[in-house]
Image: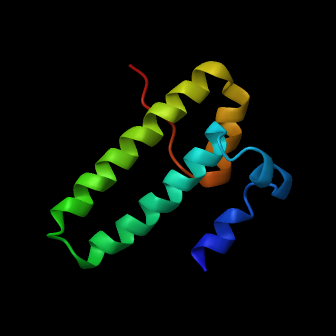
Amino acid sequence: MVKNSLISVIPQEEKEENKGSVEFQVFNFTNKIRRLTSHLEFHKKDFLSQRGLRRILGKRQRLLAYLSKKSGIRYKKLISNLDIRELKTR
């Protein structure tokens, strides 16, 4: 049910053409993060899943940093569509 509601964020023609695009990868990582977060609410001592979650968060963070450097407009649009926070700037 959650998967179907999030898929509507990315237009249909983009999903089929650009499965390697940064937006699609961030979208998939966001889905995995949300699933792992709900899993960890019930299984608090599942440390391997916590490690996997941290790895996925790092990958998504690197992709978002890349996208913000390349195209700020696409970055802002993606963040607003997926309802995630902006990156911290140093």
Q: Give the colour scheme of this rendering.
A: rainbow
Q: Position of residue 61 (x, y in %)?
A: 44, 37
**Residue 29: x, y in percent?**
50, 52
Q: How many marks?
A: 0
Q: Reply above or below: 28 against 85.
A: below
Q: Is residue 9 above or below residue 76?
A: below
Q: Is residue 74 above or below residue 13?
A: above
Position above or below: 45 against 9? below
Q: Residue at x 52, y 61 (%)?
A: 31
Q: Residue furthest right?
A: 13
Q: Residue at x 18, y 68 (%)?
A: 46
Q: Residue at x 42, y 30 (%)?
A: 88
Image coordinates of residue 84 in percent, x first then y, are 53, 49
The front one of 65 and 85 is 65
Between 30 and 20, which is closer to the camera in this rendering?
Answer: 20
- Quadrant of the frame with the N terminus: bottom right
Location of residue 12 by image quarter: bottom right
- At which x and y percent is residue 83? 59, 53
Q: Split into 4 quadrants, where in the image is the C terminus?
A: top left
Q: Residue at x 51, y 34 (%)?
A: 63
Query: In screen coordinates, is 64 left or right of 56?
Result: right
